Image (cartoon, rainbow, N blue to C red):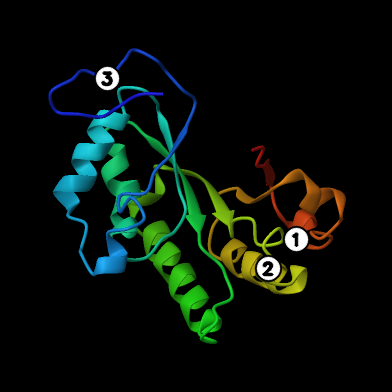
Amino acid sequence: IFSISESKKISPIKVDCLSYAPSMGWVEKFGFKISEKSIEKDLAQISTVTSCIRVYKTGGEYEKIPKLAGKYNLKVIQGVWLDTYKDGTEKEKNIKEIEALRRMIADPESVKNISTIVAGNEVMFFDRMSDILLFTYIEEIKSFTNIPIAIADIPESYRSKKYKLSSLLVDVIGVHIF
């Protein structure tokens, strides 16, 4: 929709919400850290076209996003990346994601900017975990927050009833259309 550049103004197009990843996917693979200044610069530019961002994970530099988003009047749909990993570290990594969320929720300057929490992302479509395991993670998240919890997946995952238990526990069901 638009291009962010220091030399060009952003178009006056307004959108309801944008997905945001400060690393652009490749930075972390090479061991680079994302600076707070870089995130702030991104958020300042993004705030000219939307009042909402969706973030897919909680750990590392992502943990700073909700607090920084408040400076630019951005609400955050905060994702918690839940997955199974080929190296068998899923429990440890999923717990780290949830613990980072817990810290965000405990920070008054962060929590006030989080509008919704998305537990997992297309976990059924990609067969990343069972419904009962996702249900367990959602229960844990609900135990420490009153922020609405969502799941997000493609329509087929809901039609096939893969989310029998999890869909009963969440406040919002997100549907990805592509």
* Residue drawn where x is 55% and y is 81% of the image: 86
Which of disc 2 and disc 3 is earlier in sequence? 3
Which residue is denoted by mark 1 in the rendering? 166
Residue at the limit of the structure toward the bottom, as seen here: 88
Residue 74 place in picture, x, y as percent: 36, 34
Which residue is denoted by mark 3 in the rendering? 10
CA gap, disc 1 to disc 2?
A: 7 Å
* Residue drawn where x is 21% and y is 57% of the image: 34
Q: Are marks 1 and 2 in contact (CB under 8 Å)?
A: yes
Quadrant location of residue 12?
Answer: top left
Inspect this view and state whether residue 146 appears.
no
Mark number, residue 92: none
Task: Give amino acid for label 1.
Answer: Ser
Residue in the foreground of this view, choosing between 124 and 54: 124
Quadrant location of residue 63?
Answer: bottom left
Asked which secondary structure carries label 3, the reply is loop
Which residue is denoted by mark 2 in the rendering? 134
Task: Give amino acid for label 2.
Answer: Leu
* Residue drawn where x is 47% and y is 50% of the image: 78
Task: Give amino acid for label 3.
Answer: Ile
Residue at the limit of the structure toward the top, as seen here: 12
Query: Relative to 2, is 118 on the left or the right?
Result: right
Query: Relative to 133, is 46 on the left or the right?
Result: left
Residue 11 place in picture, x, y as percent: 31, 15
Q: Quadrant of the C terminus?
A: top right
- Mark 2 surroundings within 10 Å by alpha-carbon count, few (fewer than 14), some (14 through 19), many (20 or more): many
Quadrant location of residue 75?
Answer: top left
CA gap, disc 3 to disc 2?
A: 39 Å
Q: Nearer the viewer, mark 1 or mark 3?
A: 3
